[in-house]
Amino acid sequence: MSVPRSDAFVLFGATGDLAYKQIFPALLALSRRGKLNMPVIGIGRSDLTREQFIARAKESVEQHAQRLSDPDCASIPVDPSEAAAFGKLAKQLHYLSGDYQDASTYQQLSTLLAHAERPLFYLAIPPDMFQVVIEGLKQLGCAQNARVIVEKPFGRDLASAQALHKLLETNLPQSHVFYIDHYLGKEPVQNLLYFRFANAFLQPLWNKDYIANVQITMAEAFGVTKRGRFYDSVGAIRDVIQNHLLQIVALLAMEPPLDNSQDALQDAKLAVFKAMRPISPSETIRGQFHGYREIAGVATDSQVETFAALRLHIDNARWAGVPFHIRAGKQLPVSSTEILLQLKAPSSNLVDSGPNKSPNYLRFRISPDVLISLGTLVKEAGEGMTGHPVELLARRYTCHEMMPYERLLGDAIQGDTTLFTRYECIEAAWRVVAPILDHTVPVYGYPPQSWGPAGALRLTATDGGWHDPVAPLDSEATTASSLTQTKNS
Ligand code: BG6
C-alpha cells in the first residue's frame, strides 16, 4: 500500500550545526533529484532574514562541496548544474525566527503551512526541547497527518525516553514518528549488513565457536568544534555509543531476519538488543581530552566524557562468552571507524601460528571509506612451515554515494520507516547503557591525539589489545571490485 508523500518540510534547529553540516546538503541533493517539490521552512532562534537564511544554506552546500573535493574524491566532476540546483532550492526556502516556547511561533508557522496537509517536521534540536515543540505543533491544523523526525539521542536515559515516547504516542500514530540514526542510512553500514548475509563462507564462522572477540572503534581526530554546549549535555556515551555503535553491534550480532521486510529486520535487532547485558561500570573507562573544559559552552568543572571504552556481553546462544569491545572518542589520532572480528586461532600441529603470528581476523572500515579485509597467514618461502601475515582487502571510497541524510530524509518524505530505528530498540539501548550514565565511572584526562586514558588498554589486555585504526593508506587504494594484497607491517 503506498502512503502519501509529505507536502512541506519544516526544520526546527535550522541555524544549528546539524542543519549546516548535513541537512542543507541533503536537501539540495533531494531537490536536484526532483524529490523535494515542497516548501522548506527553517525555524531557529537566531534573528535572520530570509535572505540571510538562504545565504547560510548556500554557504553550507558550498562547504560540503569543498569537503567532497578532498584529494581522495578528486575524481568527482564539478557539477555544472550546482548553481541552478541551489537556485531552485533557494526559491523553496523560508525562515521563521522564533522562540520554541512562544505560542506566536506556531501561529506564524500555521500561516506558512496554510496549504500543507501532511507536513514533515524535523526536530534537529536538543532532546530537552522536544516536549515544548511537540506541544506547540499540536496547535497546528495539519498536526494529525504530520510526520515527525526526531534526532538522537532520544531522551537522556530510559525514563526520559519513555516520557518522550508517551508524548509522541499520544499525539501521533506510531508510523508517523521517524527515529533517525544517520548511521543506519550510511552506505558502508548497509554494505556491512549485505556482506554479512551474502557470503556463504562467513555463515559457519559467525558465532562464539569461531569468533574470539569483536572490537568497534569510532575514532575522531577533531574535538567538539562549536558544539560545546550541546556536547557537554550529552558526552560520548549518549552521543554515539547508545545509538550509532549499539546499532552496529545489533547488525553484527543479530540472527538472520526471517524475511526482507522491515518488521523482520527490526525484530531481529530487537532480540539482540534484549540479549545485551547492561554494561558494568567496572568494564568501562571514561576519558576527557585535555583542553575540553576551555571550550565555549563547556562547564569549567565538566565531568563529561569525550572518550569511552567498554566491554559488552551478549547473553544468547550465538555470542555467549564473546566480548564486544567498543571505543569512541574525540581528539584521537585519526578519524576512522573500524570493526574487527578476531577469529580463534586454528588448532594445528602442522603450522607455526602462535598468537603473535595469527592475524585471523575480519576487518571492516565503515568511515571514511568502505574497506573489508581478511587477515591471513601465508607461508614464508623456504623449508619451514612458518608464515607471515598478509591482509587481503577491498576498498571503496564513498564520495559518489548517497549521503545518509539524503537517503533518510527522502525515505521519511515518502513515509518509509525501514531505515529508522524502532522505539523498542532505543529503549533497550538505554537499558544497556543505564549503569554507566551520569558519572558512575570516574573520568580521566588524556592528551589530544592519543588513544584515550591509559586505563582503556586494560580492557582488551587479555584479548590481544586494541586494534588501532589507521588513516586510509594509498596502498589500500583499490577499487570496489578488485582485491589486492598488502603485507602487514
Ligand atoms: C553524530 C555525533 O551523531 O555523529 C557527532 O553527534 C559525531 O559527535 C557524528 O561526530 C559522526 O558521524 P559521521 O557520519 O561523521 O561519522
Image (tube, helix red, strand yellow):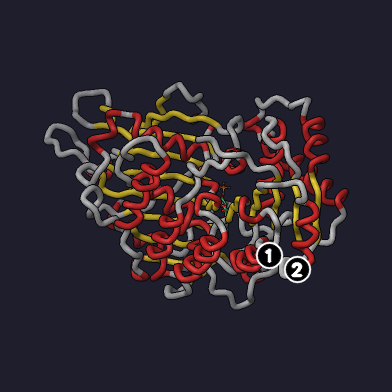
**Is residue 396 rendered to the left or right of residue 126?**
left
- Disc on res. 423: none
- Report crowding for label 1: few under 14, some 14 to 19, many 20 or more residues within 10 A (C-alpha): some
Exactly how many numbered labels are in the figure?
A: 2
The correct choice, above or below, for 126 with respect to 21 in the image is below
Q: Residue at x 60, y 39 (%)?
A: 4
Where does the image place residue 478, in percent across and percent down from the top left? 50, 25
Three-letter code, disc 1 = Gly
- Beta carbon at label 2 within 8 Å of ligand 1: no
**Is residue 158 rendered to the left or right of residue 354?**
right
Question: Which quadrant of the rendered structure holds the C terminus?
Answer: top left
User: Looking at this view, is 352 or 429 the one in front?
Assistant: 429
The correct choice, above or below, for 369 with respect to 306 in the image is above
Distance from Cα at disc 2 to Cα at disc 1: 7 Å
Residues at discs 2 and 1 in contact (Cβ within 8 Å): yes
Three-letter code, disc 2 = Ala
Q: Quadrant of residue 251?
A: top left
Q: Is residue 447 visible?
A: no
Where does the image place residue 324, in percent across and percent down from the top left? 33, 53
- Disc on res. 136: 1
Q: Label 2 belongs to which residue? A: 103
Q: Residue at x 17, y 33 (%)?
A: 351
